[in-house]
């Protein structure tokens, strides 16, 4: 049994692609693997080769009937095997996915397989981290929304309608303010952790929680900084749109206000989708390749070049699957909250605790599945552009 090959580190297949990006022959052609063997056929008659070089052929022995025996020909050689790695890689599957460019179905199926390959890490570790993050976010939201609701209620003049509007606005604002620094950062770090587990499962290995944490720990700061900068970029863009709305409102230009809101929402949606897709592979680059933060962002940006629509389509399919599954959990949770706490205010702690339990389950499922899809998209892009399948096949063979 050979020593397990870890697919991370400076000498790993992740850090050193088999074929530089955009160079060398395309796979499936057999090019780059030496000259093809000659065409199968029959060998020349005995002695013919020597005659060509000035040596007379050997005499033919007569048969028992006095007739010369016709020259015998050797049996034809077997058909030449397929040239190159193209045929071998179609059957090579040491782990959760075949080591070749993946189809959409193989990416989604591989995400489910990654959970079955290492359920203790994929679900156990995720549930623990998400639970801690959700508890912290719930307590912060409860505290912040209480302060904001009281302030808004005084500003709106109180009353039944004013209090209800103040509570609704306070809940939304508090949730927006407290989610990113708690659940958002936790999910970003978790994505990096789970990507390591999925990368091992690709070559048929299983990593322990300790091994994964030892790998990701030096990259936690880069993951957190990347998450904060990405969210700040989106928040600044949203702030600019909101500022324009306030300016036009102060000028009593209601037509411009409505137009700015509609165009602004469209702009923010397109910007968010574009940024999220172009930076989707950055966590995988930071963790698996050990890149620094800015170098990792640039590297992830380059990897998505030319694959934007494919990555967007697969990610949207994954999100739809997650939304369907989590909705089946969230809807019963909302019904239970309404039945158990019919008279509770929106800012009360008890409904928040019930929602927190539902949120833990939903976020655990969503984080596990989406992180696996991101990891497999990263593997797929590098197999398509850099020949990573060859390096992964070598790593899998050395681990046997």
Image (spheres, rainbow, N blue to C red):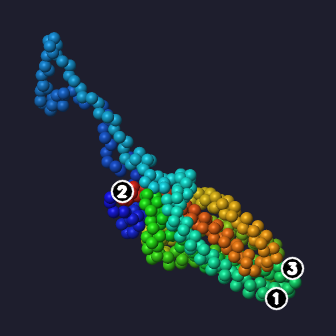
Residue 69: name its quadrant. Answer: top left
Q: Is residue 253 above or below residue 80?
A: below
Q: Nearer the viewer, residue 256 or 32?
A: 32
Q: Disc 3 and disc 1: Cα gap in Å?
A: 12 Å
Q: Are marks 3 and 2 in contact (CB under 8 Å)?
A: no
Of mark 3 and mark 2, the one earlier in the sequence is 3
Report which residue position mark 2 lands on. Answer: 400
Q: Are marks 1 and 2 in contact (CB under 8 Å)?
A: no
At horizontal 45% and vertical 68% (from top left) the residue drawn is 208
Q: Is residue 333 above or below residue 81?
A: below
Q: Is residue 334 left or right of residue 135?
A: right
Of mark 3 and mark 1, the one earlier in the sequence is 1
Judging from the image, what secondary structure is the residue with disc 1 in? helix
Q: Are marks 3 and 1 in contact (CB under 8 Å)?
A: no
Which label number is shown at residue 154?
1
Q: Nearer the viewer, residue 343 or 104?
A: 343
Judging from the image, what secondary structure is the residue with disc 2 in? loop
Relative image position of residue 226 (x, y in whole percent):
54, 75
Relative image position of residue 126 (x, y in whole percent):
56, 69
Q: Disc 1 and disc 2: Cα gap in Å?
A: 70 Å
Judging from the image, what secondary structure is the residue with disc 3 in? helix
Label 1: few (<14), some (14–19) or many (≥20) C-alpha neighbours in 10 Å: few
Q: Is residue 193 left or right of residue 71?
A: right
Q: Quadrant of the N terminus?
A: bottom left
């Amino acid at each position: 049994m050979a020593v397990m090959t870890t697919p991370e580190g400076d000498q790993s297949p992740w850090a050193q692609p088999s074929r530089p990006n955009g160079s060398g022959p395309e796979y499936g052609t057999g090019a780059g693997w030496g000259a093809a063997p000659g065409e199968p056929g029959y060998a020349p008659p005995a002695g013919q080769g020597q005659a060509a070089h000035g040596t007379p052929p050997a005499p033919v022995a007569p048969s028992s009937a006095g007739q010369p025996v016709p020259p015998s020909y050797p049996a034809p050689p077997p058909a030449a095997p397929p040239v190159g790695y193209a045929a071998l890689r179609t059957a090579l599957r040491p782990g959760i996915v075949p080591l070749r460019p993946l189809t959409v179905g193989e990416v989604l199926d591989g995400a489910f397989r990654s959970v079955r390959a290492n359920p203790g890490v994929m679900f156990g570790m995720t549930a623990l981290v998400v639970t801690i993050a959700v508890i912290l976010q719930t307590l912060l939201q409860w505290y912040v929304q209480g302060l904001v609701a009281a302030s808004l209620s005084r500003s709106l003049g109180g009353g039944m309608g004013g209090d209800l509007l103040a509570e609704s606005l306070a809940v939304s604002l508090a949730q927006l303010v407290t989610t990113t620094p708690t659940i958002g950062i936790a999910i970003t770090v978790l994505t990096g952790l789970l990507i390591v587990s999925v990368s091992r499962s690709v070559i048929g290995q299983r990593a322990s929680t300790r091994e994964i944490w030892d790998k990701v720990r030096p990259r936690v700061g880069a993951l957190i900084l990347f998450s904060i900068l990405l969210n700040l970029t989106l928040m600044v863009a949203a702030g600019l749109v909101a500022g324009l709305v306030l300016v036009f409102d102060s000028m009593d230009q209601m037509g411009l206000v409505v137009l700015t809101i509609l165009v602004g929402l469209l702009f923010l949606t397109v910007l968010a989708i574009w940024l999220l897709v172009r930076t989707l592979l950055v966590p995988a680059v930071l963790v698996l390749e050990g890149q620094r933060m800015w170098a990792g962002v640039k590297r992830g940006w380059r990897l998505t070049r030319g694959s934007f629509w494919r990555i967007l389509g697969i990610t949207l399919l994954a999100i739809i699957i997650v939304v369907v599954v989590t909705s089946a959990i969230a809807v019963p949770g909302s019904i239970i909250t309404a039945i158990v706490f019919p008279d509770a205010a929106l800012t009360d702690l008890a409904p928040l605790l019930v929602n927190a339990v539902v949120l833990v389950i939903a976020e655990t499922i969503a984080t596990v599945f989406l992180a696996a899809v991101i990891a497999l998209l990263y593997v797929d892009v590098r197999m398509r552009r850099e020949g990573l399948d060859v390096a992964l096949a070598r790593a899998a063979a050395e681990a046997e």
